[in-house]
Every structure is written in C-alpha cells, then in structure tokens.
Amino acid sequence: MSPEREIGGFLQSPDWPKMGPSMLIASCLILAVRTAKWAPRESGDTTSDRELEVEVDNALVLANRVFGALLARHESLFPHTREPWFQPKDEDVPK
C-alpha cells in the first residue's frame, strides 16, 4: 500500500527551540562582561536598576546580532530540523 502523497525531499532550517539555551548563555556572558567592573549597588537604587535594564537589553541585542551573523555565514554550526515536503498528487497538478 503506497501513501497518498510521496515525500519529495526535506527542507532544513535552524532549530530555534534548541538554540534558546545558547542564546540565554550568550546574553548572560555579554551582560557579565559589560557589568563586571560596576561598583556594588544598593538594592533600592532605582537609577542603577534602570542602568541594569539597559545593559540587559544591550546584551540581548548583541547576542542576537552575533547569532544572526553566524547563521548567515556558518549555518552548519547550529542544529537543524528536517521537515518533509510532499510531491503534489496528480489531481493537484494543473493541465
């Protein structure tokens, strides 16, 4: 018994859910480097809380840019998913 439609091949694309932990680690490392020489802050100091929020946003932007550049130039470094694409049935092809 043959399936209704046959697999014509596979589309490979980056597996974003598997790269989530890598993005988290990269962002945290960037944040740690950028804030390593900060003086200790008071916990109630709202000015330093805002500075930290800005640095977290910057770390995320930098990590995102690095991942984007690496994906554009060296996509094979990252995990991929393989999704099948199917050949159209004979009745789907216009005549």
Image (cartoon, helix red, strand yellow):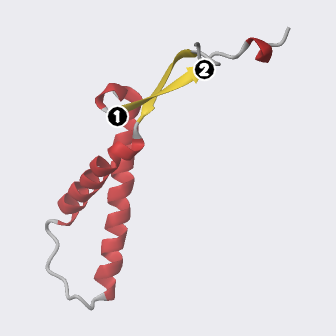
The circle drawn on residue 27 is none
Name the residue carrying label 1: 70
Task: Name above or below for residue 24 compared with residue 88.
Answer: below
Task: Name above or below for residue 7 compared with residue 52.
Answer: above
The reply, left or right, for residue 28 in relation to residue 74 is left
Q: Nearer the viewer, residue 76 or 10?
A: 10
Name the residue type under label 2: Phe
* Image quadrant occupied by the N terminus: top right
Extreme residue toward the top, this view: 95
The reply, left or right, for residue 22 in relation to residue 1 is left
Residue positioned 40% across, 38% down in the render: 15
Name the residue type under label 1: Leu
Q: Please rate how many residues cluster around mark 1, counting C-alpha atoms within 10 Å: few if below 14, some from 14 to 19, many from 20.
A: some
Q: Position of residue 31 (x, y in %)?
A: 25, 61
**How far is disc 1 from disc 2 in space, using C-alphas?**
30 Å
Q: Position of residue 91 (x, y in %)?
A: 79, 15
Secondary structure category for the residue under label 1: helix
Residue positioned 39% across, 46% down in the render: 17
Secondary structure category for the residue under label 2: strand
Residue positioned 35% across, 51% down in the render: 62
Name the residue carrying label 2: 86
Q: Earlier in the sequence, mark 1 or mark 2?
A: 1
Of marks 1 and 2, the one in the foreground? 2
Report how many numbered discs are placed on residues in the image: 2
Q: Nearer the viewer, residue 53 or 86?
A: 86
